Amino acid sequence: MSPPLAKETREKVESWLRYYEDLGIRSFYRERLANSAAGETAPASSLDAARGEGEKEPVVRAGAAALRAPVTPATKIPTLPIVQGPSLFEAAERVEGDTLERIREDIGDCTRCRLHKHRTNIVFGVGNPKAELVFIGEGPGHDEDIQGIPFVGRAGQLLTQMIEAMGLRRDDVYICNVIKCRPPENRTPEKDEIATCSPFLLRQLAVIAPRVIVCLGNVAAQTLLGTHKSISTFRGQWFDFRGSRLLATYHPAYLLRNPAAKGEVWKDLQKVMTVLGLRPKKR
Ligand code: URA
């Protein structure tokens, strides 16, 4: 029989279990120490190019493994649960009967990371829950925090113009962010904040199952593709993201600072339009 867990370890296990439960994961197994996952770390993303069948644009397979959950090395704390399956995030997407409402409920009045301390509203996401096209930004700014709606400030107005230029309305697409709470002074989200919040984004994507995902800026692109490369090195290329096509382009806030880059973003959006069979809005 296993010895009882030390209080500190038990509390840690309980808090992890609560966290997984929030993600909709309720089944676990404990690996024996001899077969433990010591050394099981996220392999670096490959971003290896592979041409998809019948594709005009190269499709690159994303390093989904890089999005693995942190698995505590069993050599250190052998009693911690190890999540079965290739990836916590992949498991999170397989939540039976998951819905956007349930994901929002699971987020609750979140205090999982430090960002809750300064936020006014959690900014979950808006738009068509069956959208063929999802835009993903970094995290809420001041206006989004106040209104609880993503992309409503200056960058958001530019995004709305871009969506309309594609011949769509905001209501046709789904818009959300990697993190749901505004970082103080709009700083870039920290690694641990992204790790805590992004499973909810992955569940949103699994529920919506869009044909195309557009990552706006480095944070969204690097999070979903599991890379540290700068977006400028892979912007405008197609990637496969678990059955959806993913393309990264510059963030509208970047375009406000660098209007000359708008042409490149428009080229990227035209690729999206081709895939979705959209015609640009008549002016
Ligand atoms: N920038 C983002 O990345 N997301 C928003 O919702 C607003 C600005």
Image: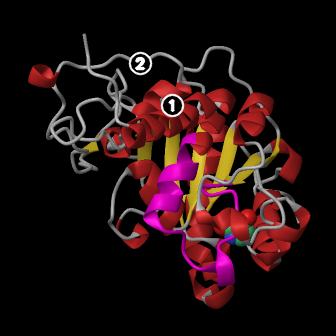
Which residue is found at the position 54% from the left and 75% from the top? 188
Circle 1 packing at 10 Å, graded few (<14), some (14-19), many (20+), is: some
Examine the rendered structure and indicate whether residue 157 appears above or below residue 224.
below
Q: Secondary structure at mark 2?
A: loop
Please report the bounds of the magenta region as a residue range.
177-199
Between the residue at mark 1 and the residue at mark 2, the CA separation in whole angstroms equals 9 Å
Which image quarter is the N terminus in?
A: top left
- Quick check: can you spot residue 195? yes
For residue 205, which quarter of the picture?
top right
Is 194 covered by the magenta stretch? yes
Which residue is found at the position 19% from the left and 31% from the top? 37
Foreground residue, 58 or 256?
256
Foreground residue, 141 or 8?
8
Task: Residue 17: give its label.
Answer: 1
Task: Identify residue type, mark 1.
Answer: Leu
Q: Position of residue 209 (x, y in %)?
A: 63, 30
For the residues bearing labels 1 and 2, Cβ distance under 8 angstroms: yes
Q: Secondary structure at mark 1?
A: helix
Circle 2 packing at 10 Å, graded few (<14), some (14-19), many (20+), is: few
Q: For the view shown, which residue lies furthest in the left direction?
A: 34
Examine the rendered structure and indicate whether residue 151 appears above or below residue 126.
below
Can you tell me which quadrant of the image ligand 1 is in? Answer: bottom right
User: Left or right: 262 with respect to 224?
Assistant: right
Task: Identify residue type, mark 2.
Answer: Phe
Task: Residue 28: give its label.
Answer: 2
Q: Is mark 1 within 8 Å of ligand 1?
A: no
Q: Position of residue 102 (x, y in %)?
A: 75, 29
Q: Is mark 2 within 8 Å of ligand 1?
A: no
Which residue is found at the position 75% from the left and 32% from the top? 100
Which image quarter is the C terminus in?
A: bottom right
